[in-house]
Image: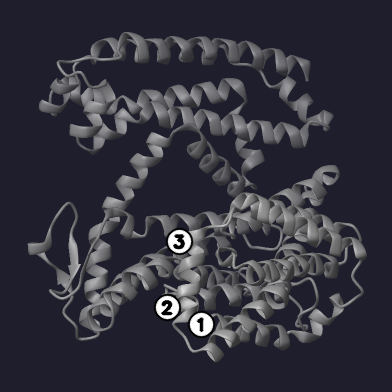
Amino acid sequence: MFTFLKKTALVCTLVLLELLILWYFKHIVNYRLGSSSLLFNDILRQHGDYQIMLVSNIHRIFSIGLLSYFLMLIIILSKEIGKLEFFTKLNKYKFNFSLILKNIFYFFILLILFFIFNNPEYLIENPYSWQSLVFKLSPIIWILYLHNICNMIFPINIFIKIVSGNIILLYIVSIISLLFFSNDLMNFLANFWSSMLLIPTIKLASGFSYLFDLNYKLLPEFFGSFPAFGTSKFYVEITPACSGYEGMSLIVLLLGGYCFIQKKVLKLPKALLIIPIAGIMMFVLNGFRIFVLVAIGHYWSPQLAIDGFHSVAGWLNLLVTFILALLALNLPFFQKEAKPKRPIEFGDTALLIPLMTLIIVSLLTKAVNPNFAWFYPVNIVIATWTLYFFLKPFQLFLTRPSGLSVAIGVVVFLLWTILIPENLTQSAHFIAELNTAPLWLSLLWLLFRVLGAAVVIPIAEEFAFRGYLQPHLQNWFGRKGFKSASVIASLGITALLFGYVHSNMLAGSVAGLFFGLAYLQRRQLIDAVMAHAVTNALLAAYVMGFGYWSYW
């Protein structure tokens, strides 16, 4: 083990010295070159072709690749640290001195390139000169240099054998490295892919309009910074963000993470086929979303189209695609072993269904009426029906709650009112909307609002977060060898996700943390439900007693 570490330390010292020298010549000596006051790479990105844009970002890609390799090595070593035979094999690995010579050779070539290419305007204006052609081929040197460094630090052939069964892990680490290392590169990739998808998305939306015998199209007379799509009566400006790349990226991350967690039961890499299929589905649904948006604005209400449907349609597409993908992944085609046919039991995915139903119905009703949640009773009725449909497995949680859970509910109520100040503007808007309806209808709506807040929502949310997510995360961390930290990790992650789905993330995360502790005190889900119900019931009384309607 120590022989391997000594070799690695020497190699890392050499590589670090080389990278510092390259960084010095890139950021200090060659900081501004050419006749322009702009940075060298900024000129290339703004005025160069795709090949030059690639070269201008190769330094970042190199850094991300090296960082990903280091992260994977840390994960591998942390898992193999207790196996003596693992380090015995590494110590027997003969270090090839030619790797050092190659490393020095590639390093000096890159250093020379920094001196040769000192005029970005010339490279752009003369794309077929030998300097420009060599510059465009320079990523090959960076790739060879990266490969050689990785091979010196840790033998790549051994690395490939170890990670061959952890492709999803490699994918996740690469994404984390990309997010961590360069916001500029993320912006570059986002702009690149959104521009690539923009015209196909508009064509797809036009195709849907012709399919339904309508005539929505690009409107040259309304062109501004971006294309306009629709009719002379209602049109929308299609920006790159409308191309759907965000939804496609999210579905890839979600399904990639799910496949990683469920890799023991899924047939990999066959199950990974669902990811590009889901991405294509998101692309098609996004084109359909733009078509429906124009249809609502043209035939019904422009305000409803923009403030209602437009604000929720993307999330609906994501939820529908994710649910269908999960259902597909549970088919025998993607499963290593066929699941026995049995009724849904407590602790299974049935616990997620009430909250998923509530979210989907809430998005749909918000799309119809975005200004005020007049359809809130519809959400509660459908969620209640879902709970009744799965009544048998849910009856298992019906035990006597502890007194501590009630106290936790009171504490969370006090913290909620402290962390979220009352908003007078929202309260005024709320009461003004409520006064537009007859008294009996307003009272009926308030009754549903209280029942939903104090009964239905606590049950639906606690089933999902403390009944399903927190125990599953704890079991997963335990299986991965982090048993001592599994409780804290699952509690923290669940609390953060709980905060994310609420209007105020800090207050929501604090509430999720306390509800998680309420569950952990006896491992009884009723305690989390009771704490949540007490908090919401006190909040409902506080809202109606003092008129602080912004909390609703």
Across and down, in percent, residue 151 comes to: 56, 24
Which of discs 3 and 2 lies nearer the camera? The answer is 2
How would you rate the neighbour count of disc 1 (Cα within 10 Å): few for under 14, some for 14-19, many for 20 or more? some
Residue drawn where x is 21% and y is 33% of the image: 46
Image-based side of 399 in relation to 266, left or right: right
What's the CA distance linking mark 3 and mark 1?
36 Å
**Residue at numbered disc 3:** 276
Q: Residues within 10 Å of mark 3 (few under 14, many from 20)?
A: some
Query: How far from the left and from the top, in percent, is residue 504?
Result: 58, 54
Q: Is residue 521 above or below residue 69?
A: below
x and y percentages locating residue 147 in the rendered image: 49, 27
Residue 384, compared with residue 73, is above or below; it is below
Dot 1: element: loop
Residue under label 1, please give it: 375
| Residue 36 is at least partly visible in this image | yes
Give the residue displayed 64% in from the left and 50% down from the top: 419
Residue 338 visible in the shown view: no
Precedes in sequence: disc 3 or disc 2? 3
Q: Do callouts 2 and 1 mark residues in contact (Cβ within 8 Å)?
A: yes
Q: Quadrant of the C terminus?
A: bottom right
- Residue type, numbered disc 2: Asn
Foreground tag (3 vs 1): 1
Badge 2 or badge 1: first in the primary sequence: 2
Question: Mark 2 = which residue?
Answer: 369
Amino acid at dot 1? Phe
Residue at 26% x, 79% y is 295
Describe the element under mark 2 as helix, strand or loop: loop
Query: In terms of depth relative to the viewer, which is nearer, 253 or 234?
Result: 234
